[in-house]
Image: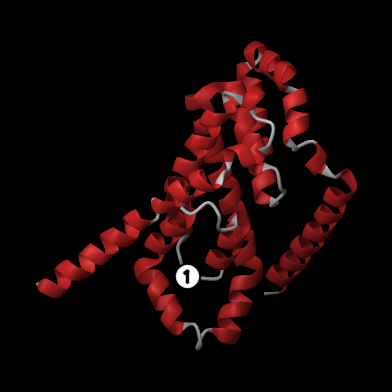
């Protein structure tokens, strides 16, 4: 127990130090749409000359940004489309974003789940049972709605009993439609002057409507069970 406690303290200290470094370096300026567009030709040239290195670097940078919840994922998703194209860019972003989300999920679970469940477990019994039964459907629904904060989903799910396997799998599936759309938009990066041009209200509404699919499937299952 002492080792686990020390490890938690070390991780908390590391997170605090990481936030201080992030504030000092201010990576937002390097992850802005304007800056990435200014580097587009140089990045495309490098990727064409060193495809394996560019893919590896892109994957780990994207994973780190999402795991640390640093703003800039949308701009990076557009850049992935501009550099790698639709298919390869979608694959890189899809797996990198899910890996980053899972890393944040596991960290939050290790640091917070035990405390929350031990203190409030008796109040969360119904929620825990619901998550164990239907958690993947809830997660998939949340992931299909791009207006719901990415960071919030990772944190909330970490406090529940959902398995890491289900978290990874349904996050990967749920984030794929938005990933494809934004990577595809990135292939026309030169024409994009504002992130709002891509993440417009009609696009967000259209993506959110996909969330009705798992809910409709669940409702149909309940109706079939009731009829039987």
Kindly indicate the quadrant of the structure image that contains residue 93: top right
Q: Which residue does the numbered mark 1 point to in the structure image?
A: 161
Kindly indicate the quadrant of the structure image that contains residue 129: bottom left
| Structural crowding at the residue carrying mark 1, measured as other residues with C-alpha within 10 Å and reported as few (<14), some (14–19) or many (≥20) | some
Residue at the image position 57 percent from the left and 85 percent from the top: 120
Give the farthest residue toward the right. Answer: 24
- Looking at the picture, how far across and down is residue 35, in whole percent? 78, 31
- Looking at the picture, how far across and down is residue 140, in whole percent? 42, 56
Q: Nearer the viewer, residue 42 or 206?
A: 206
- Looking at the picture, how far across and down is residue 60, in whole percent? 65, 36
Q: Is residue 18 visible?
A: yes
- Looking at the picture, how far across and down is residue 220, in whole percent? 22, 63
Kindly indicate the quadrant of the structure image that contains residue 190: top right
Q: Is 26 positioned to the left or the right of 57 in the image?
A: right
Residue at the image position 65 percent from the left and 17 percent from the top: 47
Is the N terminus in the top left, top right, bottom left or bottom right quadrant? Answer: bottom right
Residue at the image position 87 percent from the left and 44 percent from the top: 25
Is the C terminus in the top left, top right, bottom left or bottom right quadrant? Answer: bottom left
The answer to whether residue 189 is above or below residue 114 is above
**Element type at mark 1:** loop
Q: Nearer the viewer, residue 172 or 177?
A: 177
User: How many numbered circles does the render carry?
Assistant: 1
The answer to whether residue 10 is above or below residue 78 is below
Q: Is residue 62 visible?
A: no
């Amino acid at each position: 127990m002492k080792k686990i406690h020390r490890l938690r303290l070390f991780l908390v200290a590391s997170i605090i130090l990481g936030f201080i470094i992030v504030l000092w370096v201010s990576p937002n300026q390097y992850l802005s749409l304007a800056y990435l567009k200014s580097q587009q030709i140089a990045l495309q040239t490098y990727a064409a000359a060193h495809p394996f290195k560019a893919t590896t670097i892109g994957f780990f940078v994207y994973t780190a940004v999402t795991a640390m919840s640093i703003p800039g994922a949308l701009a990076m998703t557009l850049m992935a489309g501009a550099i790698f194209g639709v298919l390869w860019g979608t694959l890189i972003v899809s797996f990198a974003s899910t890996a980053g989300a899972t890393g944040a999920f596991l960290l939050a679970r290790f640091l917070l789940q035990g405390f929350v469940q031990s203190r409030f477990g008796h109040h969360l019994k119904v929620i825990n049972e619901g998550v164990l039964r239907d958690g993947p459907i809830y997660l998939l629904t949340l992931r299909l709605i791009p207006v719901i904060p990415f960071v919030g989903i990772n944190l909330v799910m970490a406090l529940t009993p959902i398995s890491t396997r289900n978290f990874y799998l349904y996050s990967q599936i749920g984030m794929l439609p938005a990933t494809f759309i934004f990577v595809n938009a990135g292939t026309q990066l030169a024409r994009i002057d504002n992130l709002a041009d891509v993440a417009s209200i009609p696009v967000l509404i259209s993506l959110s409507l996909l969330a009705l699919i798992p809910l409709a499937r669940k409702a149909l299952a309940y109706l079939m069970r009731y009829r039987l």
